[in-house]
Image: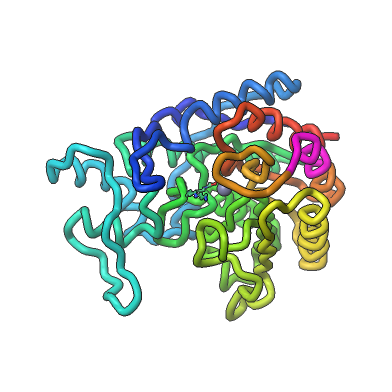
Amino acid sequence: MHIFYSEDHKLRDAKTELFGGELVAPFEAPFRAEWILAAVKEAGFRDVVAPDHHGLDVALKLHSPDYLDFLETAWSRWVADGYRGEAIATCFPARRMRQHPPRDIDGALGYYSFAAETAITEGTYAAARAAMDCALSAADHIHAGNRAAFALCRPPGHHAAIDLYGGYSFINNAACAAQRLRDQGAAKVAVLDVDFHHGNGTQDIFYERNDVYFASLHGDPVDAFPYFLGFADEEGAGEGLGTTKNYPLPRRTGYDVWSAAMADALARIAAFGAEAMVVSLGVDTFERDPISFFRLTSDDYIRMGAALKRTGLPVVVCMEGGYGVPEIGLNVANVLKGLSG
Ligand code: SP5
Ligand code: ZN
């Protein structure tokens, strides 16, 4: 299985995350990709290749043009205003306020985000483009006839919505992979999101579409970020009604309950008629993840990968979350091990 990896992920190296009222070292940091890369190589996945450079044509089918332009220019606008710290949103267009992009960068940050923990920094956009390139190249690799590919995306992408960043996500890598698979001829595609957090961005992007099925297993939003999306009654709208499925799960969920939900999701994806699948892989479901509350063990990730393989579908795996502990590498390698059987 090919691993698509770009050194440019290191350009996303924020110094600050707003957490517990303090600016702390971000959970989403370069060491994550380095640990994961080392572990997958150690597990025998040695075909590590740099992605091709892609344009924005696929992303422009998912994100709004003004949003992508904002991402590209936000840091220079912030610096031009004389701010000395990293760019953190502080004011949001909340209930009953006007939804209009401000001219001022401080306001634009709030307009284009849904969470303040994620700072924009100098290299953020370049790194997000490289992560997108990994996802697109992995999709191209599937189109070329391979059964599976791993896009070691960093920063992650599944929280990035049509015109919102947050949750450490800027461009939705998994959505780009799914769109690429569609553009290359797959009539129907599924995105299975197994990150601990609800994939609000991916859901938003495909909510009214009937060609992409979205299923997500995650911490119940009454208890977990992103709090305001991912409930069981969200099922898609318009032409997309019935093509979104959410599995909000309680604290201390282990693999028995979790895997039953995954099996239900995979049955629905098969019934939908997906010809290819993108997996948003977060290993923040791990029992010792520092910011999450599921109880998966390292061996469970082998079983997860094997279940993905049993679908018989070609699979693009996109890296999402998973933090703090050395086991993130092993857990990702275990998914790939199960998937390549
Ligand atoms: C890609 C991904 O996994 N993004 C997750 C972003 C989560 N950021 C907010 C973290 C807040 C953690 N709150 C923990 C509360 C523990 N009581
Ligand atoms: Zn997550």
- The residue at the point 69 percent across, 75 percent down is 242
Which residue is pictured at 58% across the width and 58% down the height?
198
Name the spot of residue 110 as percent of width and height, x first. 30, 59
**Which image quadrant for residue 18?**
top left
The residue lying toward the viewer, choosing from 326 and 190, is 326
Q: Nearer the viewer, residue 292 or 185?
A: 292
Evaluate whether residue 186 shows in this view: yes
Whether residue 162 appears in magenta in the rendering, the answer is: no
Residue 185 is at least partly visible in this image = no
Residue 116 x %, y % = 36, 52
Residue 133, given in percent of the width and then of the height, sits at: 51, 39
Report the side of 199 relative to 75 (left or right): right
Of residues 180 and 149, the one nearer the viewer is 149
User: Mainly helix, strand or loop, the magenta region?
Assistant: helix
Left or right side of 248 for 128: left
Vertical position of residue 127 compared to residue 143: above or below: above
* Quadrant into which the N terminus falls: top right
Left or right: 160 in relation to 311 = left
Residue at 44% across, 41% down = 128
State which region is magenta.
Answer: 296-305
The magenta stretch spans residue 298: yes
Q: Quadrant of residue 211?
A: bottom right
Q: Quadrant of the C terminus?
A: top right
